Image: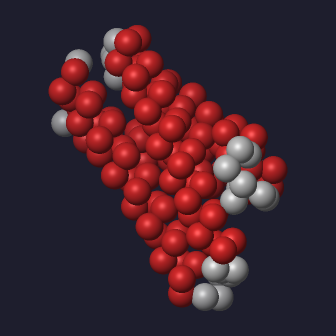
Amino acid sequence: MVLLLLFAAFQIKHLVADFFLQNAKMIMGRERYWHMGRAQHAGIHVIFSILVLFVFGTSASLIFWIALIEFIVHFHIDWAKARISVDMNLSPDQPMYWYAMGTDQALHQLTYVVMAWAWLTFI
């Protein structure tokens, strides 16, 4: 039951960080690898994950490793999607835009599955 609550908390965290707190600065120019806005966006995800993991009684060392790996993974998933979207000149009226968006979101969700597995395994 606690694992399901953790996963639900990650889902809510993702909704807030990916859709409500992402601004134009974080989106524009994301196809460049070194992009401060994308780093800030990944950082927001990490901050919220740290809060979620803390609430669920996770040790500081496990929080550190999960947060570090989440930052790296989130940064690169978003970079790959942006790179593909720009290279293919995708816009919301094209099916490939939505394929890219769906793949991006699925990869983030799989990240939360791994994070929840790590929590369950190492608590």
| Residue situated in front as seen by the camera: 50 or 36 | 36
Give the quadrant of the N terminus. Answer: top left
| Residue situated in front as seen by the camera: 28 or 49 | 28
| Residue 22 seen in the current view | no
Q: Position of residue 85 (x, y in %)?
A: 63, 72
Picture layout, residue 58 above or below residue 4: above
51 vs 8, left or right, is right
| Residue 24 seen in the current view | yes
Q: Position of residue 58 (x, y in %)?
A: 34, 17
| Residue 53 sits in quarter | top left
Number of marks in picture: 0
109 vs 13, left or right, is left
Picture layout, residue 55 above or below residue 89: above
Residue depicted at 59% across the width and 70% down the height = 84
Q: Position of residue 28 (x, y in %)?
A: 79, 58
Residue depicted at 51% across the width and 45% down the height = 74
- Asked which colour scheme the image uses, the reply is secondary structure
Give the quadrant of the C terminus. Answer: top left
